[in-house]
Amino acid sequence: MAAIGAGNAFLMRKPRRISQPTFQHNVVVLIPARNEAENLAELIPQLTPQCRVIVCDDESEDGTAEIARANGAQVISPSEALPFGWTGKNRACHLLAKVALESTDCKWWIFLDADARVSHDFVESSVGLAEQMPKNWAVLTGFPNILPGKFPEPLFLGWVGWILLSTNPFFLVSRTRKSHNRFTNGQITVWRSSVYAELWPNEQLKGRILEDVMIGRLLAKNGYGVDVANLASTLKVRMYDTWKAAFDGMSKNSFEIIGSAIGTVVLAAFLMFIAWGWLFASSAWVAGGLFLMLGLGAFFMTLGVKGDPSWDYRLAGKTIRVPNAYLSAPLNLIVAPIMISIGAVTMIRSLIWKKRGLTTWKGRVYTH
């Protein structure tokens, strides 16, 4: 896990930064949004100088549509309440794709979450990276810079990055063009529009809560590759402000990773073993070595996808700028067992939510 974490930290592909973008790529950004007025007021002005933006206002109650229009985006809205069997995000993405297909001839569609923040060259650098994919690769996705909320929020979210970046060799698949990671990150996907229009993945997976992982598996089943990149230099996201919001958000998703009660319990038990098994080693040296390897996975995970923003510190009358990674990566090395234990607890909570019909998100309860 430490080796995979290091490989992903240093060898994942990254977009080439562009000081003066030309904005000549044939691309549209598609944003599903439910009660995201505050986020869209910041995000859309960052995007509209770069390309066309379409927002799907998913039955919002906070003026999302008005804010989106005022900032230069095209806005669409569903014609009816959310039908049974659909999740809100799947329906919104499906409607966005239909409008993009009917009203544009764009080669690339960028699906982007409303809580994202982008650099001035985000669109051009992302599409430039996608253009380098083989023709049978359909999607560019990746990891943004996840900005921390109020402590201890990072402990309730960090295990997700750890389990992904310490177990899945994204760098190896991307560099060799072999195999398949069976993964997409729903925060950012850059699609070949022709492939999306062939598969209509959000419609196929309309009832799935963790649709992005399912889409990765669907692409693999249909023979399409996915390129997973380190996008921290051009894209940042603050997913949650508080530990409770992170706990609830991950409780919504975690059961879907396995999809069965037995599998979820087994994975949670395995995570607890990984987190604390080093305590039962036969010698202090072995215990220390195991703890170090465990922590290094979390260390490299954080180091790899924490590029911005930097933090300013005053020292001896001078301002010193320290990259975020060099502050949070050592902390994750030390607290890795606690962080991973929270992941195990989250999975059990997710299972309970599922069995009791309590899976809730964006004000909707998903019982199916």
Image: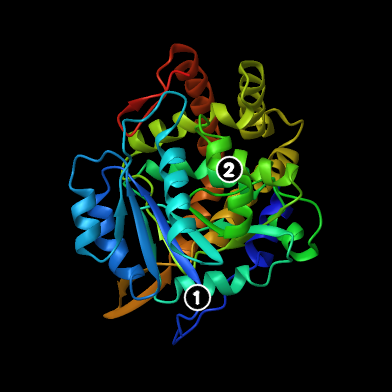
> For residue 226, what is the image quadrant?
bottom right
Task: Give the CA distance from mark 1 to mark 2.
Answer: 25 Å
Instruction: Please state which amino acid type lies under the numbered disc 1.
Output: Glu
Q: Nearer the viewer, mark 1 or mark 2?
A: 2
**Measured from the top left, where is residue 283 in percent x and y?**
75, 35
Can residue 192 be seen from the camera position used here? no
Instruction: Please state which amino acid type lies under the numbered disc 2.
Output: Pro
> For residue 79, what is the image quadrant?
top left
Q: Between residues 156 and 357, which one lies in front from this camera angle?
A: 357
Q: Between residues 54 and 237, which one lies in front from this camera angle?
A: 54
Q: Between residues 122 and 96, which one lies in front from this camera angle?
A: 96
Asked whether the residues under the numbered discs 1 and 2 touch, taking CB atoms below 8 Å apart as contact, a structural biologist would say: no
Q: Within 10 Å of the Cα at label 1, are there few (<14), some (14-19), or many (20+) other Cα atoms?
A: many
- Name the residue that disc number 2 marks: 201
Which residue is painted at 49% across and 24% down in the image?
350
Q: Secondary structure at mark 2?
A: helix
Q: Is residue 244 above or below residue 158?
A: above
**Measured from the top left, where is residue 245 in percent x and y?**
34, 36
Query: On the rendered structure, is 260 left or right of 286?
Result: left
Which residue is painted at 47% across and 39% down in the image?
90
- Name the residue that disc number 1 marks: 124
Which residue is painted at 58% across and 51% down in the image?
197
Can residue 307 be seen from the camera position used here? yes
Q: Secondary structure at mark 1?
A: helix
Which labelled disc corresponds to residue 284? none
